[in-house]
Image (cartoon, coloured by chain):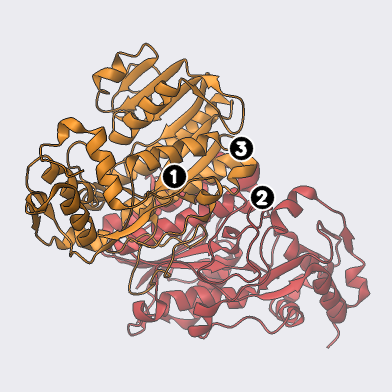
Chain colours: A orange, B red
């Protein structure tokens, strides 16, 4: 079985790739598990060395739009033997808000081109589309309901959310037409994300934990009482895999499935960090308001009821402290502070 | 004030144009009424002679995508003095289901190109986007709620509905960004539509009345108990105009507003026709099932609660019999049968 991950050198793509390679086999839509013979990681960046050392891994490096347009003199993104595509590549929320055309191109045009490439195969490959909590947005004219359900009307309040929601619609219709077997999965804000800060408005929700643990200062641009819906990288990858594995009947409608999340606040996140690493860690957080980031993040909902996900056995993390402890265990080289047991 | 209507030679476009020209002035978003100095009708077909005879009317004839791409050696679709665009042009539901690429090009690409042309003006023109009841679709995996509200999650079950729903998202985000002042309006199935049958799956919902009134046979491809949500051409044009006229505050959220509709059944429509024109009319209806059309039409909802529209004073027609009588009065040359008073 050949597997493709767009955004395959990103932190979720890398984690998904490692999980797939470690398992060695994948069951698609309820079918029997099949060995993974090739794993193509499509990204602007090169995947890390451990992945490149695996004989099953092929890196396809370049701009996704250009690759799909065939402008790069490399192999096509999907081929006749592609059984599944995890489409994780995207311009992030802050970038899309700052550069409208970049977002339209990276998120809308690239997604459509990828779906058209899959359709052209005439093999109906599985496509797991990473949509986002950002499809939900609160506004004075249209307040969000108290709790977000799978069938709550998305009212995106930023371009990234609009583009992800449009992607869901395309995936649904290409699926209905039999061009692909699509799975629309809404990812929650993932924390703690390893690596470097990025242009996502939610970037600080990892940075305010990750940087202090590494002994360096971090900014928190919103007030401590800001409520957020979070999921760990592990639970997020579990959700992507479950979407691929679940049969059509168990998956249900073509509309998107909300992944589970815990509700917490930025202040509670800092308190959990203090319990894990002491005030030496939380003293490294600078509470510096940033209206541009707050305008995006405070419009996302925090109460998510992930009913469909629960029906597939997907549950939220235990609490944010356990998420921090997972991060510390999984990223020992990124942690410089002493950790209380 | 310069006004643009795409699909300006279609039956709604023509009716809207005549209404605008007769009024002579238009109030935009709560501002004072302004004289309409130019009305540009963009369509593949030429508008009727009465419109062309009006000195204020300019016809821009050609493929909308080609016109927007600047490939046709004619004037641009929108210009700096364009105050408002009514975007009615679309490939219809049956066409989009039969030819996926045609639908994507005519409905998605053309809408986006039109919005980009408006954005490029940097004048924030008003854009009234004619979305559709077809964004709502019933399916075994995801049954529609009993009643459709303005905030019911659309789950389109045909490509036309998906493309219209994507158009709503684009209009919402271009509005949020300040590129346009957008108004998303969901039109109900319009009946009785004058003119010829077309490729819309709903075409028979006019044809089964219009053709018998003209003394010619018509097919009804669904069972008499099929429930439908209908609005007259007059009420539909009223809704489009109200969308343009209403202030931002009164209009409310950027999500789409459902126009009002009456709920009836195809059998009740035939019964109303019999009351107006006798069984000599209904004897001309051939009840010949067409599974392809039934698959689309029977998935549309019939119970529409148009709360936002009601708040703007937009009410449904009285009943279907009154809709037929309106048609008879407005289209005397298309009626050959005797009509009971």
User: Which labelled disc corresponds to residue B94?
Assistant: 2
Q: Are marks 2 and 1 on the same chain?
A: yes
**Residue drawn at 53 percent across, 39 percent down:** A182
Q: Left or right: where does residue A1 sit relative to residue B197?
A: left
Viewer-side label of 2, 3: 3
Determine if marks 2 and 3 fall on one subunit: no
Name which quarter of the figure residue A270 lies in: bottom left
Q: Is label 2 in contact with label 1 (beta carbons under 8 Å)? A: no
As displayed, is residue A300 above or below residue A317? below
In the picture, the disc for residue B66 is 1
Q: Residue A187: x, y in percent?
A: 39, 47
Q: Residue furthest front?
A: A341
x, y percent for residue B252:
39, 76
Name the foreground residue: A88 vs A76: A88
Position of A60 relative to A319 (above/below): above
Of the image marks 2 and 1, the number of the one nearer the N terminus: 1
A324 vs B149, nearest the viewer: A324
Left or right relative to B98: residue A98: left
Q: In the shown orientation, is residue B167 left or right of residue B225?
A: left
> Which of the chains bears the disc numbered 1?
B
What's the chain of the residue with tag 3?
A
Q: Is residue A41 visible?
A: yes
Quarter of image, res B39: bottom left
Which image quarter: residue A18?
top left
Name the secondary structure under disc 1. Answer: helix
Q: How far is mark 2 from mark 3, CA to CA?
A: 30 Å
Q: Which residue is denoted by mark 3 in the rendering? A: A247
Residue A90 pos. (x, y %): 32, 40
């Amino acid at each position: 079985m050949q597997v493709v991950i767009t955004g395959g050198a990103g932190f979720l793509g890398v984690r998904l790739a490692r999980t797939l390679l470690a398992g060695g086999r994948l069951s698609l839509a309820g079918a029997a598990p099949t060995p993974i013979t090739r794993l193509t990681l499509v990204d602007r960046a090169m995947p890390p060395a451990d992945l490149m050392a695996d004989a099953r891994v092929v890196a396809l490096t370049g701009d996704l739009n250009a690759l799909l347009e065939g402008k790069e003199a490399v192999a096509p993104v999907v081929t006749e033997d592609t059984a599944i595509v995890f489409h994780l590549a995207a311009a992030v929320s802050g970038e899309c808000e700052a550069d409208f055309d970049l977002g339209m191109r990276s998120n809308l045009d690239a997604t459509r081109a990828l779906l058209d490439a899959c359709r052209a195969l005439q093999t109906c490959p599985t496509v797991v589309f990473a949509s986002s909590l950002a499809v939900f947005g609160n506004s004075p004219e249209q307040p969000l309901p108290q709790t977000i359900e799978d069938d709550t009307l998305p009212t995106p309040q930023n371009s990234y959310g609009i583009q992800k929601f449009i992607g869901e619609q395309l995936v649904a219709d290409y699926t209905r037409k039999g061009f692909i077997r699509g799975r629309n999965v809404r990812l929650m804000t993932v924390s703690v994300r390893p690596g470097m800060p990025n242009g996502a408005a939610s970037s600080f929700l990892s940075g305010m934990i990750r940087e202090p643990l590494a002994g360096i200062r971090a900014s928190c641009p919103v007030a401590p009482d800001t409520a957020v819906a979070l999921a760990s990288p592990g639970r997020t990858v579990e959700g992507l895999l479950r979407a691929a594995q679940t049969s059509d009947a168990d998956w249900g409608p073509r509309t998107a499935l909300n992944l589970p999340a815990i509700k917490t606040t930025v202040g509670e996140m800092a308190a959990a960090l203090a319990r894990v690493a002491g005030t030496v860690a939380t003293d490294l957080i600078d509470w510096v308001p940033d209206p541009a980031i707050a305008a995006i993040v405070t419009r996302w909902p925090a109460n998510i009821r992930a009913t469909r996900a629960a029906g597939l056995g997907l549950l939220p993390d235990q609490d944010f402290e356990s998420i921090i402890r997972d991060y510390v265990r999984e990223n020992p080289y990124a942690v410089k502070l002493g950790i209380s047991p």
